[in-house]
Every structure is written in C-alpha cells, then in structure tokens.
Amino acid sequence: NAGVTQTPKFRVLKTGQSMTLLCAQDMNHEYMYWYRQDPGMGLRLIHYSVGEGTTAKGEVPDGYNVSRLKKQNFLLGLESAAPSQTSVYFCASSRPGSATYEQYFGPGTRLTVT
Amino acid sequence: AQTVTQSQPEMSVQEAETVTLSCTYDTSESDYYLFWYKQPPSRQMILVIRQEAYKQQNATENRFSVNFQKAAKSFSLKISDSQLGDAAMYFCAYYSGSARQLTFGSGTQLTVLP
C-alpha cells in the first residue's frame, strides 16, 4: 500500500495563477483532510470531506476550493494564488468508527507563490 | 472551538536522558482523543502516541509515555532514553469526535545533544 500520496511535491506559482493539488489514498478511508503548515505554527485545517461528494470548511478555507468526486481522491484548488498562500500543504485520511481516530498523512507539498 | 497550547517552542535533551514536552488544551467536550505527532526534517508526520479521553490509564509506547491529567486538561509527552533519532518537531493534537476535526498545537522543536 502506498498510503497517502500527494502530487506535486514542490511547486512555484506567480501571483494570480491557479493550480490543483492532488491527494490520493489507497486505504479505503472515508474521511480526508487538507491542512496548511506555516513556520512557527501547527497544521491548520483548510477543508475536509467525510465522504465521496461531500466537503466542509475548516479553520482557514478562504482562497481554496476542494472536490471529492472519488472516494480515494481529494483535490485542493487555488483559483488565484496569493503570496499569503505560500506554505506546506498536507493531506490526510482517516477511517470513521475506528478505535483510534488516527489520521494518516501524506508527505506534503511545498508551494511558493511569488 | 478547541485550542491546543504548547508553551515550549524549543527543548533540548542529552542523549540517553529523559525529557518531557508539555501540552494543554481547552475543551468542553467529553468525547475526544489526544495525539502526539513527530515531524522530522523529512516533513513526514508520524504518530507517536495516542490517548483516549475516557481512559484513565496513561498510554505508553516503548520509550514514549504520556501524563494525561483530564481535569487539568494537560497532556504531556515523556521521552525516556532519548536518541539522536528523536530530534524533530513534536506536535500535540486534539481530535473532536463531534466536529471530526484535529486541532494542532504550535509545536516543540526537540534537539538531542550527543
């Protein structure tokens, strides 16, 4: 099993450009999450999904959109990138009803917006 | 909303010694889970240990153990016989069963001195 994978690993954007980050998991997890990590801060939740076709806002959703068309994939979109969105982005997944509620994380995507 | 506070931005420990990382949280819920995650320079988020709030017994995983004080809303991590490989950023995290969200503290950077 690959676990949780993220594409791409690195990306540089110019202000105003758009892009999509792809998260894929092969553990048949229902729940998926997108976080951002900034220096000196922990991970902050952007959006999450509790099942195929459903999404919800997290703590810092502005400037981002998400889609969960397939259970194994969770896409994070930036329609018009801004320098404030320079960050490391992590995807995670988990299985509801598990005894542990553990979230499994991808390796992260480092995004720089100039 | 829940908050997680890690008051020690940096800690250091001598190899083979013991170190304790502090974490406090604020919640009005009764159903929740607490986690410690490790993030080495590779950026990968690695689960170290978990604690169910309904369990009074402190969790242990080999050299890692927690001191869970539910009334005080405190969840500290003790690392015994510290090893060079333990050097990393450590994040305390709170999982809300009702909100289905994980909230992270700001992290503690642990340095292990040879």
Image: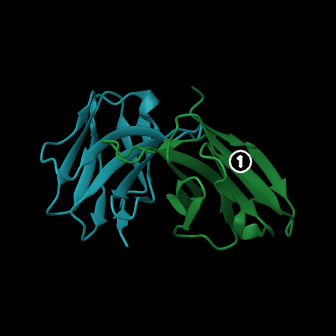
Chain colours: A green, B cyan
Q: Which of the 4 quarters of the picture holds residue A85?
A: bottom right
Q: Which of the 4 quarters of the picture holds residue A13?
A: bottom right
Residue B2: horizontal and vertical position, in percent?
35, 69
Q: Is mark 1 on a helix, strand or loop?
A: strand
Observer-nearest of A17 and A84: A17
Observer-nearest of B104 and B15: B104
Residue A60: horizontal and vertical position, in percent?
57, 70
Q: To which chain does the residue with label 1 belong?
A: A
* Label 1 crowd (10 A; few <14 / some 14-19 / many >=20): some
Note whether B42 is above or below A49 in the view shown. Answer: above
Instruction: Check the picture and name the quadrant holding the C terminus of chain A.
Output: bottom right
Question: Residue at 57% across / 60% down in the picture?
Answer: A54
Question: Residue at 61% across / 42% down in the picture?
Answer: A72
Residue B32: horizontal and vertical position, in percent?
28, 57
Note whether B18 is above or below A56 in the view shown. Answer: above
Question: Residue at 25% across / 67% down in the picture?
Answer: B29
Residue A95: horizontal and vertical position, in percent?
43, 44
- How many circles with numbers are drawn on the protein? 1
Q: In this view, does B85 lie to the left or right of B75?
A: right
Observer-nearest of A21 and B83: A21
Observer-nearest of A53 and A11: A53
Q: Is residue A112 left or right of residue B93?
A: right
- The answer to whether residue A40 is seen in the rendering is no
The residue labelled by disc 1 is A22
Q: Is residue A26 left or right of residue B4?
A: right
Q: Is residue B54 left or right of residue B41?
A: left
The amino acid on which the numbered mark 1 sits, given as a three-letter code, is Leu
Question: Residue at 46% across / 36% down in the picture?
Answer: B87
Instruction: Check the picture and name the quadrant holding the N terminus of chain A.
Output: top right
